[in-house]
Amino acid sequence: MPMFVVLAGCSQPKGELVVFAAASMTEGATAIGAEYQQAYNSSVTVNHGGSDMLAYQISQGARADVLITADLEAMDIVSKRSEAVVFATSELVVAASEKVDSFDDLSRPGIKIAMAAKEVPAGRYTRAALEKIDPKLAKAIMANVVTQEPNVRSALNKAKLGEVDAAFVYSTDVAGTDLKAIELPAEARQQAQYYIVAFTPAGKDYVALARTSPGRDALTKLGFGKPE
Amino acid sequence: MRWSGWWAASAPLIAFLALPVFALVISAKPEEVLAGLSSPSSRSALTLSAWTSVASTLTILVLGTPLAYALSKRPKGLGRLVEALVDLPLLLPPAVAGVALLLAFGRAGLLGPALSVWGVELPFTTIAVVAAQVFVACPLYVRAAALGLAGVSGDLSEAAVMDGSNTWNTFRRIQMPLAAAALVEGAIISWARALGEFGATLIFAGNFPGRTQTMPLAIYLGFEFDFRSALALSALLLAVSVIVLLVARCLRPTLSFRAY
C-alpha cells in the first residue's frame, strides 16, 4: 500500500495530475483518470490509502491536485469542508464467507470480524450502523471484532485471505471477490458519500470530469451510486 | 589521524541522526505528553508494547542462543543456508514478513488447520504480536551472539575439555561469560527492534486496542486523527526507549561480570 508518497515538488513533470483517493475509490479514481488522460493528454497518478491519512499528508505539504475522501470528516483535515462536493455513493455492507449467511450470524460465538478503525470513514460508518441496531446484538458483534484495520481494503483482505469470516466494507469492494455481500438491516443502512475537492486548476478539470458524463458512467459501471 | 579526527568525520551522521530526534522532542509540549500518558488508550498501548517486547526478547534469548552457538562454529554447507535464513527477516519488508506469517500460521495458512485442532488460532492475538516481534528481531540477537561466541578463544574451550568438561559446562562457564557482553548487547538491540516493530504486527496481529495495538500502531493511527497527541506519544516512546537503552548499556559491564 503506497501510503507514503515522496513528492519532491521539483521532480514533478509538468502535466502530471496527482489524485489522492480513498482506498475504496481506487478503481473509480483510476477510471476517471483514464478519461482525464484522453481529454487533456496528461498522465494521472492515483495515490490511495485511508482518507484521513491522505488528507493529513496533504495538510503537511504533500502535493496533490485532487483529494477524494469517503466521508466529509476527512475533508476537515485539509479545511475544505465547505468546498468539497459529493460525487458518488456506495453502501456499507458485510463481506462474508460461507460461515456467515445473515447479519445475525455475525453475533455467533467464534465468528471473527474485521472492521476499519475509527480513524477511517468506513470505521465511522460501521460504528454508526452498530449504534442503530439492538444493543445486545451490537455488543455481541463487537465482541467478535478481532481487528480494526487502518483502511477498508485491508479489512477486506483479511476476509479474502480467510483469516476472518466477515468484514465491514463497501458494496463496491465486494465485487470481484469470492465473498458475498450481506446488506445491513434497514434501520442501520449507511450510505457512504464520497467527497471530492480540487487544489489546483488542473484538479478542477478532473473534478468536472468526475461529476459529468464520461466520469459518471465509469463510476456507475463500477457499482457506485449517484449523489442525490 | 588523531582520535578527534574520527569524531569530526562522524559529525555528519551524528547530526543526521540527532536532528530529527531533536525536532521531535522540541515539538512535543510537556502538557500534551502528560495528557498522552493519562489517556487510557495510550496507556494500554504503552503497557502492551512494554511487556510484549520483553517477552519477545526473552523468547529470542532462549531460542536464539543455541542457534547462535551453532552458527559460531561457522558450519559449512547446510549451515550456510541456515545463516542466510537467519538474515532473511532483516531483508524482508516488515509488511511482507507479516503476510508471510499469516500465510504460514494463519487460520487459512499452512499450519492453520493443524493449530486449530489444538484450539490455537494465532492471528489477532497478543501471542501473534510477540511472534511478529520475534520474527523481525531475532536476527539482531543471533548475529551479535554468534559473533561474540565465535570471538571466544578456542584454546580456552579446548583446555576445559581436556580437563574433563563436557560441552554444556564449557559453554556455560567459559564461552557464555566471555561472550556475555556481546550477548547482552544483542539482547538490547533486538529488544529495541521488537519495541519499534510495526508492519508485521499490523498485518499478522491486526490492530485491536488493549490486545494487539502496540505503541507504534497507536501512533500511526493517531497521526491521522489527532496529530498533536500522536506527536506526544512519539516523544514519550522516544524518551522511554532512550532511558532503557542508556540504563542497559550502563549495566552491561555489570551484567557481563555477574555472568562469571
Image (cartoon, rainbow, N blue to C red):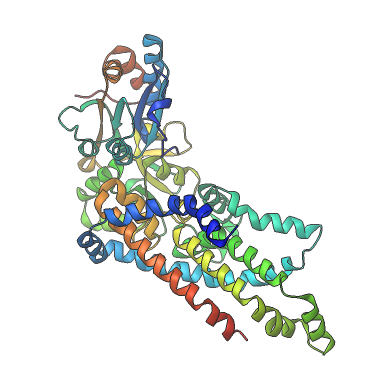
Q: Residue at x 25, y 61 (%)?
A: B33
Q: Is residue A124 above or below residue A12?
A: below
Between A101 and A85, the residue placed more toward the observer is A85
Quadrant of the drawing holding the N terminus of chain B: bottom right
Relative to B235, does residue A74 appear above or below in the rendering? above
Q: Nearer the viewer, residue A11 or A44?
A: A11
Residue B210 appearing in the image: no
Residue A144 position in % (x across, y down): 36, 57
State the residue lying farthest toward the bottom. B163
Q: Position of residue A145 (x, y in %)?
A: 36, 55
Query: From the image, which quarter does the C terminus of chain B lie in?
Result: bottom right
Q: Is residue B76 above or below residue A228?
A: below
**Left or right: where A158 falls relative to A85:** right
Task: Give percent across and percent down for residue B204.
Answer: 49, 54
Q: Position of residue B234 (x, y in %)?
A: 34, 57
Could you tell me if residue A159 is visible in this image?
yes
Tell me which corner region of the image, top left, top right, bottom left or bottom right, holds residue A172: top left
- Residue, x 55% and y 79% (percent of image)? B253
> Farthest left residue?
A82
| Number of numbered discs | 0
Answer left or right for A34 relative to B35.
right
